[in-house]
Amino acid sequence: MDVNKLLDELEELVEHGQGNAVGRIRWFRKAFFLDVDDVLDITHQIRVCLPQQIQRADQITREKERILAEAHEQADRMVTEAAEQAEMTIRKAQEEARILVSNHEITRQATQEGQRIMDQAAKDGEAIREGAREFARQLLENLAQAITNLSQYAGQLQRAAEQAREDVHLS
């Protein structure tokens, strides 16, 4: 029997004098007497039913917690698997993209052309440096020659000036 039904029956018995033990109730205005055996019988039945109901409630609660735990574990597994699959898909796409780019003919040709241009620039740079060195060497030689010529001319002017002074002094 259900605990709530037994409590309802006891309540009815006390409040209205109704229930299975109706014939054994004696009314005195607002007061009445109950058969102690009836009350004890109902309370005994409540005590017997109560542990069963509590056990059933505990069992239902444990089952609910187990189902929730399984659902959480399954959800966690699904999220982990989805993340791993997404990561694997991304890595695969990146690898495929890298292969496509590295194998692509335009990329290969651009790399070759870039290398050719860099080699030519290195050669041209070396030629320009060599030309600049040669120009600087020639410029320095010309400057040295001009300085030598200027020095000789200055010496000639100095001698001419000395000669002119001597001629002025003698005259």
Image: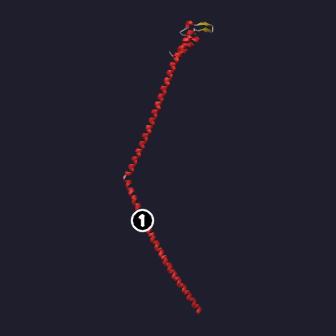
- Residue 72 spot, x, y in % from top left: 47, 32
Residue shown at the point (42%, 44%) measured from the top left: 91
Name the residue: 51% across, 78% down.
147
Q: Is residue 12 left or right of residue 93?
A: right
> Quadrant location of the C terminus?
bottom right
Colour scheme shown: secondary structure
In the image shown, does 52 or 32 lie closer to the viewer? 52
**Nearer to the camera, 28 or 36:** 36
Q: Residues within 10 Å of mark 1 (few under 14, many from 20)?
A: few
Location of residue 100 with respect to 122 vertically, above or below: above
Figure check: 111 above or below 128? above
Instruction: Locate residue 112, reporting x and y percent.
Output: 38, 57
Residue drawn at the location 43% of the way across and 42% of the way down: 87
x, y percent for residue 131: 44, 69
**Most foreground residue, 159 or 42:** 42
Disc count in the image? 1
- For disc 1, the marked residue is 124
* Position of 50 relative to 77 (above/below): above
Q: Estimate the x, y position of residue 16 in percent, counting from the top left.
A: 58, 11
Q: Secondary structure at mark 1?
A: helix
Give, as a three-letter code, the residue at label 1: Asp
In the rendered structure, the answer to whether residue 93 lies left or right of residue 47 reads: left
- Left of 49 or right of it: where is 88? left
**Placement of 153 over or under 113, stated as above or below:** below
